[in-house]
Image: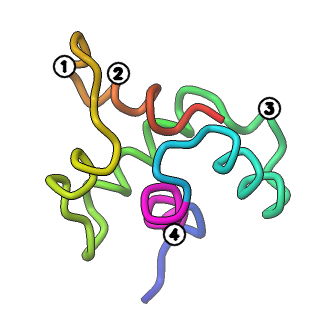
Amino acid sequence: MFGHPEFEFSWAGVQLTRGDKRLLGALLDGYGLPDTARDTAFRRRLMAYTLLHPYSVMKWYFDWMPVPCGVTTFEQLAELWWAA
C-alpha cells in the first residue's frame, strides 16, 4: 500500500502507546520526528489517518483510551491522543 509515512503512526499510536504521551513521544523521537513538526496540523492529520486506517475500530480505541467529559470534537480528540 502506498501512502504518507505518517499514516502508520495512527496504528502505532493507538495500538502500542494507547494514549501514553511519554511512549508516543519516544516513538516519534525514535523515528526522528523533531518536536517542531508535532504541531496542531500534525495531530489533526494523525486523527484523520486514525479514522481512515483499514484496521481502525473506534469503539476499541474508546475502550482503551477513555475520553474525558467535554471532549466532543475530533479536533479535541486529536489534541488529547496525539500531543507528544
Name the quadrant of the C terminus: top right
Q: Is residue 56 left or right of residue 18?
A: left
Q: Which mark is residue 52?
A: none
Measuring from the top left, give residue 19's x and y in whole percent.
Answer: 48, 43
The mark closer to the camera, 3 or 2, is: 2
Q: Residue visible at 19% across and 63% down?
A: 57
Crowd band around label 4 with a 10 angstrom C-alpha radius: few (<14), some (14–19), many (20+): some
Q: Is residue 53 left or right of residue 14?
A: left
Secondary structure under tag 3 reads helix
Magenta-colored segment: predominant secondary structure: helix
Question: Which residue is at the far top?
Answer: 70
Residue 9 magenta-highlighted = yes
Q: Earlier in the sequence, mark 4 or mark 3?
A: 4
Question: Where is 42 relative to 23, above or below?
Answer: above
- What is the spatial separation of the Cα atoms under label 3 and label 1, in whole angstroms? 27 Å
- CA separation in Å, label 4 and label 1: 25 Å
In the displayed structure, 46 sits above or below 43; it is below
Disc 4: which residue: 8
Q: Circle 3 is placed at which residue position?
A: 36
Q: Mark 2: which amino acid?
A: Gln
Question: Most extreme residue toward the bottom, as rendered?
Answer: 1
Q: Nearer the viewer, mark 3 or mark 1?
A: 1
The kind of residue on which mark 4 rests is Glu
**Residue drawn at (43%, 36%) of the image:** 44
Residue drawn at 23 percent across, 45 percent down: 62
Between 20 and 41, the residue placed more toward the observer is 20
| Residue 65, horizontal then vertical, whole percent | 34, 43
Residue under label 2: 76
Q: Amino acid at mark 3?
A: Thr
Number of other residues with Cα within 10 Å of mark 3, as a class: few under 14, some 14 to 19, many 20 or more:
few
**Which range is magenta?**
7-16
**Residue for badge 1:** 72
